[in-house]
Amino acid sequence: MSEDRPRIVIAGAGSGVGKTTVTLGLMAAFGKRGLEVQGFKAGPDYIDPGYHTAVTGRPSRNLDTWMLAPDTMREIFLRGSRGADISIIEGVMGLYDGKGPLSDRGSTAEIAIMLQSPVILVINIDSMARSAAAVVKGYQLLNPAVPIAGVIANRGGSEGHFRLVQAAIEQECGIPVLGWIARDPSISIPERHLGLIPAIERGETNSLFARLAVLIEKGIDLDRLQSLASKAPRLEMPEKQLFANYVPAKEVTIAVARDAAFNFYYPENLELLAHGGARLQFFSPLRGEHVPEEADGLYIGGGFPEEFVRELSGNSGVKDSFRRKIGEGMPTCAECGGYMYLTEVIIDREGNTRPMAGVIPAVVRMKDGLSALGYREVEAVTDNLLLKRGEKARGHEFHYSTLIWKTKNRTSAYETSGRSGKRREGYASENLLAGYTHLHFASNPAMAKRFISACKKYRSRRKNHEQ
């Protein structure tokens, strides 16, 4: 069955050209018009979707053609955009930047082709006039299959400057320049930042979104942009669907840590658990909430626990609840920030030692710069909570810390493959799987099913023990 989904991709000539500014401004401006707007982010990023969600009031979703099969990516788009008047897909890096330099794999361009979505190319026109046409022409010629439908010029010096650029691009490239944004240092998105979630919760981003909406309304032809989005062809829902077999009965309860310290979850990970029969119970370790007693499983996602290390360290009762529940055999999945929290100690950037939950025999040391960044394919080195030995899944790694083991007798979670080669990573026990990699359950849906199955067994053992 084909479905109508008005949509555009906001792509950039490179990182830092203003994709996020344009994307958020368009979301806010269309929202002011009374449209229901759905946000998406190309690639594995968590920060930009947080902004999208704050602007639109709808959960933003990641579209990724490396972690996910093409049909799965298309299903996520179609499912996530139901009920929306327009979907806005924010690209990642430059239009053609993806998994590697020799193909479009994993790039914004590949997503645009697969979704047959019009692409609006954002370019920085600072110190350019006719040369801007050469930039756009190059993007058109590199892969003519990419449906570049228009241009937005950012950082223009004046109305006259913009008109020069517009004339050159429209003559040489044959596509419309839909508008421009003036150079304005005061209009900038806050750093992709550790304080994002608290700022959104406190409403501190609302004034920014309002200013961006005014900026976009002033300089961009919204009617023409909406018309381009509405001309996107209908899409077919894949015959084989990830969310096809719904289990209505909530057979187990999985506690999910979610607050300013732990908030990086792919929506589909949580939805696959719910779809498969789990009731999700959210709780906040940062606010002093213990692991719920009624829980049959525990999921601790990533985030920035290092920014709240004093508060997390100081709450002994919460740490004890994690240690006790995991020690009793509760099935637990911990990723990145959650992995760090389960270790014995986090040493912060000032050299302070902060005791953590003490489940995993390791010490985490914070670094000033990135320790790891990039896609990862994982292969289980033994049967574990989510994967059978030899099974693979895909995800992404991004962190500013290193982990120092205090024992040689440990079982790694998996072997990871990335640009720097292969290495053993993470920690596995009978009921715990923890590591730096953020796994996307949709890359291997059996992971969600196994997690739920383990929770059922734990629930049964616990009930029998209580009788």
Image (cartoon, helix red, strand yellow):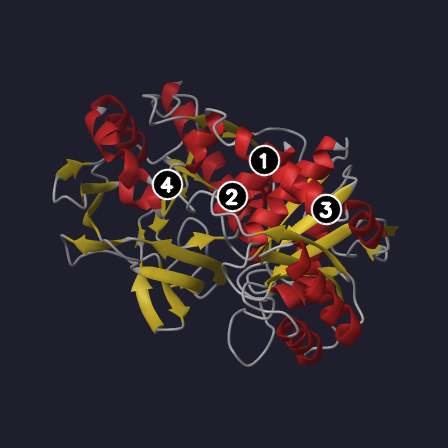
Amino acid bearing label 4: Leu
Which residue is found at the position 64% from the left and 35% from the top? 56
Which residue is found at the position 73% from the left and 43% from the top? 81
Place residue 272 in its image quadrant: top right
Front residue (pair 345, 274)? 345
Place residue 285 in its image quadrant: top left
Give how far across and how far down residue 366 sits, in percent: 22, 49
Give how far across and how far down residue 372 sits, in percent: 33, 61
Q: Which mark is residue 187?
A: 2
Front residue (pair 154, 357)? 154
Marks 2 and 4, how far apart at CA:
19 Å
Q: Earlier in the sequence, mark 1 or mark 2?
A: 2
Q: Which mark is residue 87?
A: 3
Inspect this view and state whether residue 334 appears.
Answer: yes
Inspect this view and state whether residue 255 appears.
Answer: no
Q: Could you say whether the residue bearing mark 1 is in a helix, strand or loop?
A: helix
Amino acid bearing label 1: Arg
